[in-house]
Image (cartoon, rainbow, N blue to C red):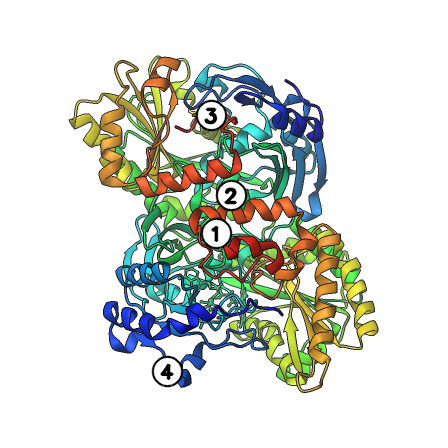
């Protein structure tokens, strides 16, 4: 099925008599495998509105992310949350779409400063499981009218509704960027440096540490963006506080962040990949604990240490029991991002929730999708 | 404003209810004498008042859960309350409801600079959250003008904003986790010191749910290191169009001011008479504030001033000292007080696309003539969040009704140009009946379905947000 209008899509969902597998560009093969008829969203494509002076962009959900980025770049703007492109890591082909990005709440290194995809999402239109055309939020930057279902739809992986249109707050591309880089730090020292940078007044827009062996020798990096003079000033201030950090600028700096954003060091390397969100200082603690428990892995720490990409052996449960055991003591959540279908069937891909929370999630799904036909089971 | 008729069966249960509440709370935490329940009869939307059946002031999550279990068991509606500064009537009781106030729950539970968060009980006031960390040069960014009084509880329920949210975002962008007690007394931990949700983003929907999904008792909030400095610049223009264009050009240029505030002529004149901040007598005035070190501030202001000059301002005033900065902000900060000196006022809160600013201001001016009521505009221009202040005389029969009708027309205009009814104050009862102008019936139905899941009996703050007619069947069941 490949609808070309919202009305057509609504009719298809209303008339569906079995499960649907909602697909944007098919580049983010994440979640428990879904059996169902493919609902190809690429026909609902195109930028509906871009108002640079109001920092707003509205587009249909099937619009390629690249197309939106190009439209924005023409006016010197961008999606501020730096969405990851999953293709290299997952070995997928196809064209990432806005709908897929929102459904997965995809946010890159800049999340730690400005916010996630969900924070910049101003409004959604979507079709619920009964085929109703619904809207929430809008196109303005401040809106508390009624419940915020915009956030709920972001990261719901197409299980609550099929997105048809999304609106964003966008921001100007800054004049300059620079990155402070140090090599050879332990995970604990690297993350401590990130914490010092993030706790400074210098408005850091990226703070990552690539653990030893993830991409050669360990690498710790801190990004500053803004007006040229301001970047130079803040870099100097941070260098004074973080001894041993060198500075790279422009394209060289950007390349370092693309590597982290897209988790390139793990692309094409065999193994399963987990994505963990924890309290930043717990990052190195958790990695050390897993090693002590015998779970060999490589780790990339983003978001000041709080976002951990773990590359593990895909055999057995790919470390699921040990990782989830750690999450139970430390708090946070772990998602299996890369694993073959058998693995994604065998272990819960998303962090299992405590019973009362799980009951709320189940209750919400039953309201939004009473027949249980939208990506059923994908989130567990 | 219509409120549901109090349920006589619930009213009749008062003695039994009070007795059960006294069993789980200290005596002084159950307020049931009529003279004392009056203290809770309204919030900052003072035009509407109704004393509750009783009020409770628990001191812990456990006590909150115990209270909710009793009310759930007895079928008594509960209205959560923070500091009662809502401008939308969000904390207005009904005669058959229990006010659950979290004011006694104001402790700091954990401060973590390494991970940049603070965990507090939600009765703590907004300003005292920053107060708890400012000696270490940290702050909590969302800064509603009511920050001295309003509680984090209300901030979360309303997803409150502030003057500096152009850069730092509103409450939802700075909220990491909550402890939530649902109506049946279940205690839930949602989010925490980590970022984003592992499953559905329940935190995102709880923030801004106006006390209808659960009682928030604790919150984990993001804190940031203070900037090195901040400085405002004041600009005067001879038309709203030009000022509006200047706002657009600034935010497009790639400098991100922390605040862009706008005042129109009626407001400028009123504040001048009241506070004497030395504002120019012009059609429209902007205050733009940037942050950073001295050199960084200069770099940003140079760019901003260049943009401003290209719009032929009638006045451009740079601050060279802390005193001058304070003077620039003085008028803006006294604007509400100044308007209040002239008359009673109603403060609206619609948001519009920034590009519609000149048109909307012109239409408001025309409507002001038609209704014969004065209006001043002072608002957060960078994000299009308007605050028209409509002047009326509460003692003059018919004036409040006229003012409300005028306000409703302004809000409908906001929706018509692509905006919304409320940018930061919430719907409450004030904008409840206008929801139909922004949402189709299905759009409200799916929101109410969320409440069905969290609060199946519709006992929590039930008469708010959704028009009574729209929520009638659910409230009855
Ligand atoms: C002079 C003035 C200036 C203002 N300026 C701003 C501003 O700049 N920006 C802005 O956004 N707002 C502003 N406001 C509005 C108001 O201050 C905010 O809405 C504030 O967040 C309300 O907080 P409160 O603690 O007083 O909440 P209350 O008024 O007590 O309650 C507000 C809502 O929250 C719910 N609630 C309270 N506690 C809980 C809880 N524990 N769990 C669940 N729900 C709960 C209530 O049921 C109600 O619906 C202003 C108000 C005034 C009077």
Label pair 1/2, CB-CB below 8 angstroms: yes
**Position in image of residue B473 (x %, y %):** 56, 53
The residue singled out by tag 3 in the image is A376
- CA distance for labels 4 and 2: 42 Å
> What residue is shown with label 1?
B172
- Taking the spot 63% from the left edge, 17% from the top edge, the residue there is A1
Distance between mark 3 and mark 2 Cα atoms: 20 Å
Q: Are marks 4 and 3 on the same chain?
A: no
Q: Residue at x 24, y 69 (%)?
A: B23
User: Disc 1 versus disc 3: distance between alpha carbons?
Assistant: 29 Å
The number of callouts visible is: 4
Contact flag, marks 4 and 3 (Cβ < 8 Å): no
Residue at image point 44% right, 54% down: B457
Q: Earlier in the sequence, mark 4 or mark 1?
A: 4
Q: Nearer the viewer, mark 4 or mark 1?
A: 4
Secondary element at image label 2: helix
Chain containing the residue with disc 3: A
Q: Position of residue A332 (x, y in %)?
A: 32, 39
Q: On the image, numbered disc 4 is attached to which residue?
A: B33
The local crowd at label 2, few if under 14, some if 14 to 19, many if 20 or more residues have their Cα within 10 Å, is: many
The span from disc 1 to disc 2 (Cα, nearest Å) is 10 Å
Per the model, the C-alpha gap separating discs 4 and 3 is: 54 Å
Residue B5 in view, yes or no: yes
Determine the image quadrant of residue B402: bottom right
Q: Which mark is residue A151?
A: 2
Kindly state the secondary structure of the residue where label 1 is placed: helix
Give the distance between the C-alpha atoms of the residues marked 4 and 1, in whole angstroms.
37 Å
Nearer the camera: disc 1 or disc 2: 2
């Amino acid at each position: 099925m490949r609808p070309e209008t919202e009305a057509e899509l609504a009719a298809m969902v209303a008339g569906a008599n079995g499960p649907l597998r909602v697909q944007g560009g098919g580049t983010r093969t994440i979640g428990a495998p879904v059996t169902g008829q493919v609902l190809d969203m690429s026909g609902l494509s195109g930028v509906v509105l871009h108002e640079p002076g109001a920092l707003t962009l509205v587009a249909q959900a099937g619009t390629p992310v690249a197309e939106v980025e190009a439209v924005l770049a023409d006016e010197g703007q961008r999606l501020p949350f730096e969405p990851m492109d999953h293709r290299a890591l997952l070995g997928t082909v196809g064209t990432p779409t806005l709908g897929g990005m929102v459904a997965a709440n995809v946010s890159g290194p800049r999340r730690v400063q400005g916010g996630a995809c969900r924070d910049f999402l101003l409004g959604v239109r979507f079709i619920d499981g009964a085929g109703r055309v619904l809207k929430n939020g809008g196109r303005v930057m401040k809106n508390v009218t009624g419940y915020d279902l915009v956030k709920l739809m972001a990261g719901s992986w197409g299980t609550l509704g099929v997105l048809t249109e999304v609106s964003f707050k966008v921001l100007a591309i800054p004049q300059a960027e620079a990155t402070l880089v140090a090599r050879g730090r332990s995970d604990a020292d690297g993350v401590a440096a990130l914490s010092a940078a993030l706790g400074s007044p210098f408005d850091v827009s990226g703070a990552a540490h690539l653990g030893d062996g993830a991409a050669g020798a360990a690498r710790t990096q801190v990004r500053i963006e803004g007006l040229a003079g301001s970047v130079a000033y803040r870099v100097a201030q941070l260098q004074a506080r973080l001894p041993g950090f060198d500075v790279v600028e422009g394209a060289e700096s950007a390349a370092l962040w693309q590597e982290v954003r897209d988790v390139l060091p793990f692309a094409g390397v065999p193994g399963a990949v987990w994505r963990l969100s924890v309290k930043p200082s717990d990052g190195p603690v958790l990695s050390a604990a897993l090693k002590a428990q015998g779970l060999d892995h490589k780790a990339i720490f983003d978001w000041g240490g709080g976002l951990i990409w773990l590359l593990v052996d895909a055999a057995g449960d790919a470390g699921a029991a040990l990782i989830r055991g750690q999450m139970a003591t430390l708090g946070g959540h772990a998602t299996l991002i890369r694993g073959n279908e058998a693995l994604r069937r065998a272990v819960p891909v998303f962090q299992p929730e405590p019973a009362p929370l799980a009951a709320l999630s189940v209750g919400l799904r039953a309201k939004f999708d009473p027949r249980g036909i939208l990506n059923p089971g994908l989130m567990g | 404003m219509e409120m549901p008729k109090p349920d006589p069966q619930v009213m009749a249960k008062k003695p039994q209810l009070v007795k059960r509440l006294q069993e789980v709370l200290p005596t002084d935490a159950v307020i049931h004498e009529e003279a004392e329940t009056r203290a809770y009869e309204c919030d900052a939307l003072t035009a509407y008042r109704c004393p509750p059946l009783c009020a409770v002031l628990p001191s812990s999550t456990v006590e909150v859960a115990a209270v909710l279990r009793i009310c759930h068991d007895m079928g008594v509606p509960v209205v959560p309350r923070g500091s009662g500064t809502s401008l939308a009537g969000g904390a207005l009781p009904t005669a058959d409801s229990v006010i659950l106030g979290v004011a006694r729950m104001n402790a700091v539970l954990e401060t973590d600079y390494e991970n940049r968060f603070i965990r507090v009980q939600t009765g703590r006031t907004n300003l005292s959250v920053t107060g708890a960390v400012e000696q270490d040069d940290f702050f909590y960014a969302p800064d509603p003008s009511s920050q001295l009084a309003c509680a984090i509880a209300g901030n979360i329920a309303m997803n409150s904003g502030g003057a500096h949210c152009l850069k730092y975002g509103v409450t939802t962008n700075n909220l990491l986790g909550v402890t939530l007690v649902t109506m049946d007394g279940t205690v839930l931990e949602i989010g925490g010191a980590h970022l984003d949700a592992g499953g559905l983003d329940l935190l995102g929907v709880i923030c801004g749910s106006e006390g209808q999904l659960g009682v928030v008792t604790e919150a984990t909030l993001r804190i940031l290191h203070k900037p090195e400095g901040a400085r405002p610049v004041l600009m005067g223009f001879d038309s709203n169009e030009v000022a509006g264009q200047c706002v657009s050009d600034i935010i497009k240029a790639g400098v991100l001011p922390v605040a862009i505030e706008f005042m129109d002529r009626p407001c400028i004149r009123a504040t001048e008479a009241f506070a004497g901040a030395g504002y120019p007598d012009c059609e429209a005035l902007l205050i733009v504030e940037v942050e950073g070190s001295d050199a960084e501030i200069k770099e940003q202001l140079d760019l901003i001033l260049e943009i401003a000059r290209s719009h032929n301002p009638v006045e451009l005033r740079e601050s060279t000292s802390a005193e001058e900065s304070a003077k620039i902000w003085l008028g803006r900060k006294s604007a509400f007080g100044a308007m209040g000196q002239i008359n009673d006022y109603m403060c609206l809160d619609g948001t519009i696309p920034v590009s519609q600013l000149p048109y909307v201001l012109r239409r408001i001016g025309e409507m002001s003539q038609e209704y014969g009521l004065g209006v001043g505009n002072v608002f957060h221009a960078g994000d299009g969040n308007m605050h028209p202040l409509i002047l009326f005389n509460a003692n003059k029969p018919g004036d409040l009704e006229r003012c409300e009708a005028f306000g409703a027309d302004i809000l409908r205009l906001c929706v018509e140009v692509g905006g919304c009814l409320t940018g930061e104050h919430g719907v409450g009862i004030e904008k409840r009946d206008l929801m139909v102008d922004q949402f189709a019936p299905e759009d409200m139905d799916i929101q109410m379905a969320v409440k069905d899941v969290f609060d199946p009996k519709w006992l929590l703050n039930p008469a708010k947000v959704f028009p009574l007619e729209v929520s009638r069947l659910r409230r009855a069941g």
